[in-house]
Amino acid sequence: MQIAAIIISLGIAAVGIALFGQVLVRMYRTITMGQPAPGRTGNPWARTRNLVIEFGAHTRLARRGKRWIGAAHWFVMVSFGLLFLTLVTAFGQLFSADFQLPLIGHWWPYQFVSELFTVAGLIAIVFLMGIRLKNLPSRQGRKSRFFGSVMWQAYYVEYTILGVMLCILTLRGAEAALENGSRFSMEYFFSAPIAQALFKHASVGTLHNVIWAVATLKIVISFAWMITISLNSNMGVAWHRFLAFVNIWFKKKEDGSTALGALNPMLSGGEPIDFEDPDEDAVFGVGKVEDFSWKGLLDFSTCTECGRCQEQCPAWNTEKPLSPKLIVLALRDNAHAKAPYVLAGGGLDMAGEEKATEEMLKGVPQDVLAEAARPFVGSPEDNAVIAAEALWSCTTCGACVEQCPVDIEHVDHIIDMRRYQVMIESAFPSEAGTMLKNIENKGNPWGMPAKKRLDWVSEVDFPVPVFGEDVENLDEIEYLYWVGCAGSLEDRAKKTTKAFAELLNIAGVKFAILGGEETCTGDPARRLGNEFLFQMQAMQNVEMLNEVFGDKPTKKIVATCPHCFNSLANEYPQVGGQYEVIHHTQLLDTLVNEGRLTPVTPIDQNITYHDPCYLGRHNKVYTPPREIIAKVPGLRNTEMHRCKEKGFCCGAGGARMWMEERIGKRINTERVDEALSTNPDVISTACPYCLVMLGDSITARKQAGEVPESMEVVDVSQLLLRSVK
């Protein structure tokens, strides 16, 4: 029996190690076939520190509502590394049943900790298996976050961990019986009861046989797992335990924050594209999987298929074809299946002709060539890798990025694919074309004349200084108020503009506006994928702003639109614009705290506050709007169940404001349903897009008689003004 155990164990270990070595090389070549990704190695100390924090504290997994899952995963994860030495011990036991590791093998702290994490890991994996079984797609359909995941792989990994843990405990029980007759000691704190129950009367020979048999089983289970993942390089549910560390270290932001806010600049071959004189070989966006950077391919390979992104996605939750998880899985599978073709030199040139010769491709299997021939973006009927309807359903709200435990950058990848579709294929929803033309020709998405931007000024009874008319320089001005297209031209958003300007006037804040000199920041164009138009708008605005501010040392801008705020603060530095930008709720909160604004008139209403995605998730501004609401006498804020970092989109982001929503339930309707569940008198927000989207849904409810006529959707500044006045 001992000889058989040795032969079986060493044989499967040799096969497993050989295959694992091969797949590591293949995995490395697959990931590095992507394009360069500059900026991923800066500040290694901060990156290492963030990796240790995310790993040690499980900050990305132990989120609100899933802390028990995070804790269970932590024990399973730590057990995987800590209990590796038990595998080494098992090999030693094949040759000598009473083998223990040199130096630490009989050291009771090591033995105790090993048993502690074996028991904790066993309990944790049973708990996680229960969670998966409770949320099976067969029971919950699309509502299951595991919908679309490769379930056999998840089951296999879970049962492998369960089997290994049971083998360790059984071995420990046999060791305890062999060593001290199953008497209690600290070394066998947890396994002594097993020894009492199973091996109390066993002979030494029987115990040797048990140890050889169970050690062999443990080794077979472990190396069968290694063989399985070696034969399935796209098995993310297993590979993430190796790749997650690398992916987190190379994340987009050195400070460890999520990949939200600014989009990645548009690169070709790792170099920024000069839009005034682009290279004739420049690649605009991502038109095939190998156009992604190596970090993108690493992202796809790291996906754990946990479905947290899918669970939070507003498009998926309203019956649309977009699931961030399914997009990542499709890109992962395509990359791994297509890799032999790409690595052999295969690919199409700018004219659509094959670059590789027949000789280069002669060793590439037919199924790989078939995968390479698939359309990248298109219809399911054409067997496209990514469904076009899924690509255009994204609101870029960032819920997927916020929730991902391994820091996958879904939004940047989706925008890169959109860039190719818009700029190379000219394939995008037709109604968005009108918006792009309006921005290009009129400087705003609505196509209204620039002089209309000043109409709201004539509707207020206090002075609003306009740069170039009432103010010649900004030396005495504290803030330049960036009103934005919606705030200047959309009737509902203009109410916010007037309320905020009046509050600034009451507080004695010296501010000025640009009036007709203002033009669209380019946010809708960039989120749609028209990077060229964004660059044109951004460079025009930066040139104008730099001229307006002149030599003023502090260039302070306040914006009421989170999309303008995000562009000015986070994206304009990419084109040379460095400004101190704050959102109007941040400034108002400061003014109230300083006593320059005093809310005194009670407003006896129930309200619920909706977090704008580009204010909340993208820029982490959650507190100021709530503090303002809390300081208005009489207001009672009831949070929706999806709020703050788990807030639900209004449906307008990602240029969706200018695209028809033809599939499934409207996102703004879903969000208003959530708001109405809190029984509010007023729905409040801090974004003109949200104001319009939520307002449209409430108007439809009023027409249907479903809500009272008094129901309002208002900006936080409007509520504050009512109380201050």
Image (cartoon, helix red, strand yellow):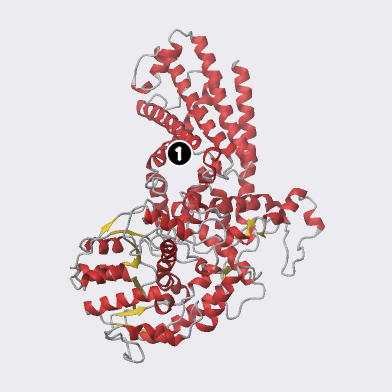
Quarter of the figure with residue 374: bottom right
Residue 165 to residue 465: above or below: above
Query: Which residue corresponds to the image point at 57% horizontal and 71% vertical from the top-left?
Result: 432
701 left or right of 155? Answer: left
Q: How far across and how far down the image is residue 122, in percent?
A: 44, 29
Query: Which residue corresponds to the image point at 49% horizontal and 62% vertical from the top-left?
Result: 396
446 left or right of 255? Answer: right
Residue 25 to residue 667: above or below: above
Picture quarter with the N terminus: top right
Residue 434 to residue 261: above or below: below
Q: Nearer the viewer, residue 680 or 614?
A: 680
Quarter of the figure with residue 23: top right
The three-letter code of the residue at mark 1 reads Met
Q: Nearer the viewer, residue 105 or 340?
A: 340
Is residue 219 at all visible to an observer of this figure?
Answer: yes
Q: How far across and how far down the image is residue 95, in percent?
A: 55, 20
Q: Dot 1 lies on which element?
A: helix
Is residue 557 at all visible to an observer of this figure?
Answer: no
Q: Nearer the viewer, residue 633 or 34?
A: 633
The residue sitting at the front extreme is 705
394 left or right of 682? Answer: right
Picture quarter with the C terminus: bottom left
Q: What crowding class fits label 1: few (fewer than 14 Cα within 10 Å), some (14-19), or many (20 or more)? A: some
Number of numbered discs: 1
Q: How far across and how far down the image is residue 543, in percent?
A: 45, 84
Q: How far across and how far down the image is residue 610, in percent?
A: 37, 60
Query: Which residue corresponds to the image point at 44% horizontal and 59% vertical from the top-left?
Result: 649
408 left or right of 66? Answer: right
**What residue is disc 1 on?**
77
